């Protein structure tokens, strides 16, 4: 069985490190991206995708 808690913790740790760097990259390159708020965090969406493909 899949341990969703462990997957979520790992993905959330990754997102905490990756997202600030990604935002900095977007600012430096001048790329525009929508900032529409969603109900799920990036970590939650990625956890669902990983569990689905597992």
Image: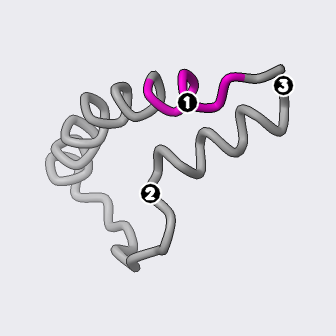
Q: Residue at x 39, y 34 (%)?
A: 12
Quick check: 48 above or below 15? below
For marks 3 and 2, give the CA distance: 20 Å
Q: Nearer the viewer, mark 1 or mark 2?
A: 1
- The residue indicated by pointer 3 is 54
The magenta segment: 3-9
Looking at the rendered image, the quarter that the N terminus falls into is top right
On screen, residue 31 above or below 10: below
Q: Position of residue 50 (x, y in %)?
A: 71, 32
Q: Position of residue 34 (x, y in %)?
A: 39, 74
When asked about the image quadrant of residue 46, the answer is: top right
Q: Which mark is residue 5?
A: 1
Residue in view at x 22 percent, y 58 percent: 30
For residue 41, the mark is 2
Between 3 and 22, the one nearer to me in the picture: 3
Q: Secondary structure at mark 3?
A: loop
Residue located at (37% from left, 67% from top): 33
- Residue sitting at 39 percent across and 77 percent down? 37
Q: Nearer the viewer, residue 19 or 2?
A: 2
Residue 24 occupies quadrant: top left
Report x, y in % for residue 44.
54, 49
Tell me where residue 43 appears, x and y as whole percent.
47, 44
Mark 2 or mark 1, which is nearer the start of the sequence? Answer: 1
Decide which of tag 3 and tag 2 comes sooner along the chain: 2
Real-space Cα distance between discs 1 and 3?
14 Å
């Amino acid at each position: 069985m899949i341990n969703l808690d462990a997957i979520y913790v790992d993905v959330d740790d990754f997102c905490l490190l990756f997202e600030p760097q990604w935002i900095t990259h977007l600012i430096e390159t001048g790329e525009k991206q929508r900032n529409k708020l969603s109900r799920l965090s990036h970590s939650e969406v990625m956890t669902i995708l990983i569990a689905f493909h597992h």
